[in-house]
Amino acid sequence: MDAVLQALADPSRRTVLEILRDHEATAGELAEALPIARPGVSRHLRVLREAGLVEARQVAQRRIYQLQPEALMELDDWLEGYRALWGNRLDALHTEITRGKKARP
């Protein structure tokens, strides 16, 4: 999970994941969407591959990148405890707001 969190820490890598969430893309297509040079995009893709967030397949002379959402499942599981915590707190806030409205004349 640490590798996934480190990969997600960079805004350019998050942008790559957002693009790949919608469709597969080549490194060139990803480079067009980012304000960085192509070698930088390649480095970001390497980090994402090493974290298990993207996968590349060779098609002729091109590499096609696709999102591997399974790598996010461990992070999602970890965050579930925090979702429950905030859900309980928001429910309690809603209860207090409702009590306050009923107490008004």
Image: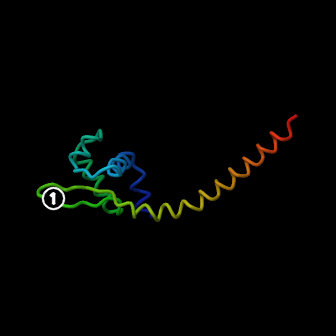
Secondary element under disc 1, as helix, strand or loop, is strand
Q: Position of residue 98 (x, y in %)?
A: 77, 44
Q: Residue at x 56, y 61 (%)?
A: 80
- Inspect the image, locate mark 1, and give the three-letter code of the amino acid beneath it: Val
The image shows residue 82 at horizontal and vertical percentages of 60, 58
Q: Nearer the viewer, residue 44 or 103?
A: 103
In the image, is residue 98 above or below residue 79?
above
Which of 28/91 is in front?
A: 91
Give the residue drawn at x 70%, y 52%.
91
Residue 99 placement (x, y as % from top left): 81, 45
Q: Is residue 84 above or below residue 34?
A: below
Q: How is the image coloured?
A: rainbow
Q: Is residue 4 left or right of residue 60?
A: right
- Taking the image as shown, residue 5 lies to the left or right of residue 31, namely right
Quarter of the image with the N terminus is bottom left
Residue at 83%, 41% in the rendered image = 102
Vertical order, 2 against 38 (above or below)? below
Q: Is residue 58 left or right of residue 5?
A: left
What residue is at 27 percent from the left and 52 percent from the top? 24
Q: Which residue is mark 1?
A: 59
